[in-house]
Amino acid sequence: MEEMLDLVNEQGDPLGRAVPRSEAHRLGLRHRTSHVWLVRRKNGALEVLLQKRSDEKDSFPGCYDISSAGHIPAGQGFVDSALRELKEELGVTAQPQDLILCGQRSFQFSAVFHGKPFKDNQVSNVYLLWLDRDAEEFTLQKEEISA
């Protein structure tokens, strides 16, 4: 079954209606996502870790992206979704208190991917997670991430 997303107002509050993810992107309906940027110190330098999206993704296939990000399923919150995406995409287990809220971001764009129109209209909570871990220690979800 396709993932259902809550439609939300400009602040990211649910409006009481959920739609399939494909409909949200076909019509450009506002929905929520969580973004987590992983930061570490290595050899005295501060590093922000990126992921490379799978070539099969419905938007920006094969591109470098946020460390971990995902749509928030209907009925879930920003933090729960951020923690779930970290575990699913990277094999990282974190606690709510580990996430540092950096702010909220809203954006819209339209593009064509794989020959199909794609309209995005997101409200995203952006988090930072300090994680001193080598790249080889992550367990990548191959359907989502290629590197």
Image (spheres, rainbow, N blue to C red):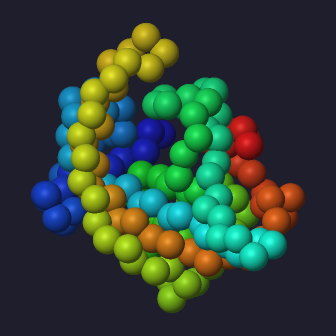
Question: Percent position (x, y) of residue 43?
Answer: 81, 72
Say which quarter of the image contains residue 15.
bottom left
In the drawing, does residue 54 fall left or right of residue 85? right
Say which quarter of the image contains residue 144.
top right
**Quadrant of the image containing the C terminus:** top right
Please name the residue shown 53% across and 64% down the image: 37
Please name the residue shown 53% across and 52% down the image: 66
Question: Percent position (x, y) of residue 76?
Answer: 38, 66
- The residue lying furthest to the top in this view is 115
Please name the residue shown 71% across and 48% down the image: 141
In the drawing, does residue 54 fall left or right of residue 105? right
> Number of labelled discs?
0
In the drawing, does residue 23 fall left or right of residue 68? left
Q: Is there any visible trace of residue 86 in the rendered image? A: no
- The residue lying furthest to the bottom in this view is 97
Give above or below for 104 relative to 98: above
Question: Percent position (x, y) of residue 116?
Answer: 39, 15
Between residues 36 and 141, which one lies in front from this camera angle? 36
Q: Is there any visible trace of residue 1 in the rendered image? A: yes
Give above or below for 76 relative to 94: above
- The residue lying furthest to the right in this view is 136
Question: Percent position (x, y) of residue 39?
Answer: 61, 70
Please name the residue shown 33% across and 18% down the image: 117
Between residues 44 and 84, which one lies in front from this camera angle? 44
